[in-house]
Image (spheres, rainbow, N blue to C red):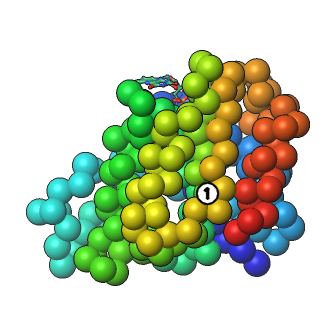
Amino acid sequence: MTTLIAFSGSLRKDSFNTRVLRALPALAPEGTQIALFDIADLPMYNQDLDGETVPEIVAALRAAIAEADGVIIAGPEYSGSYSGATKNLIDWASRPFMAGPIIGKTSMVIATTPGPGGGKNVLPATAGLLQALGGKVVAQVGAAAIHEKIAADSDTIIDEEFAQQLREGLAAF
Ligand SMILES: Cc1cc2nc3c(=O)[nH]c(=O)nc-3n(C[C@H](O)[C@H](O)[C@H](O)COP(=O)(O)O)c2cc1C
């Protein structure tokens, strides 16, 4: 059994990146479980909040990552890089100092855009953050024109090439 914890770096309700995460269980190898962790209520990282006790959602985030075999981050490209939400979750998960649960974690990075960019900047930027924390990034999967690659009325990938890249990424954990 492989357990993966997934985060979307977009907080908007109809986020394509969140919808791609919801499509993943259908593409995962048998025996792989994927849980989506909602970070909409995660506070902005503040070292004053990161003491002996931490906000409940931070404790839950750290526990979920610690218990998982790997992490998936699907993020939008904002201003040529990762969103604040993506960086914020990584900052919280990088602590306590030298013992943050994301340190050394195996991960996969996904980025999708409706435009032609396809996340070409945010993929290596996010992977670079995870690698700087000692993690192995098993796959970086991007997609442009995502509105044409996911079904309009369900969270199903309808572009076979993109679906196959996601399958291969999930199989690499
Ligand atoms: C603040 C902001 C900055 C953006 N910057 C980029 C960018 O640099 N490159 C790009 O391809 N798309 C950019 N976009 C478009 C996003 O890729 C698009 O809105 C995408 O749908 C966001 O992901 P989501 O659907 O998961 O929310 C930007 C959008 C916003 C709101």
Q: Quadrant of the C terminus?
A: bottom right
Q: Quadrant of residue 129?
A: bottom left
Q: How many residues crowd mark 1 within 10 Å: few (<14), some (14–19), many (20+)?
A: many
* Percent x, y of residue 71: 56, 63
What residue lies at 74% left-to-right and 36% top-to-bottom?
Answer: 155
* Percent x, y of residue 97: 25, 77
Confirm whether residue 150 shows in the render: yes
Residue type indicated by callout 1: Met
* Percent x, y of residue 145: 68, 22
Count of numbered circles on the image = 1
Confirm whether residue 19 shows in the render: no
Q: Is residue 117 above or below residue 7?
A: above
Q: Quadrant of residue 123?
A: top right
The verdict on label 1 being within 8 Å of ligand 1 is: no
Q: Is residue 137 above or below residue 69?
A: above
Residue position for label 1: 108
What residue lies at 86% left-to-right and 67% top-to-bottom?
Answer: 30
Q: Quadrant of the N terminus?
A: bottom right
Residue 41 or 25: which is nearer the viewer? 25
* Percent x, y of residue 35: 63, 60
Q: Is residue 75 above or below residue 96?
A: above
What residue lies at 76% left-to-right and 29% top-to-bottom?
Answer: 150
What residue lies at 84% left-to-right and 38% top-to-bottom?
Answer: 161
As helix, strand or loop, the secondary structure at mark 1 comes to: strand
Query: Residue farthest to the left?
Result: 48
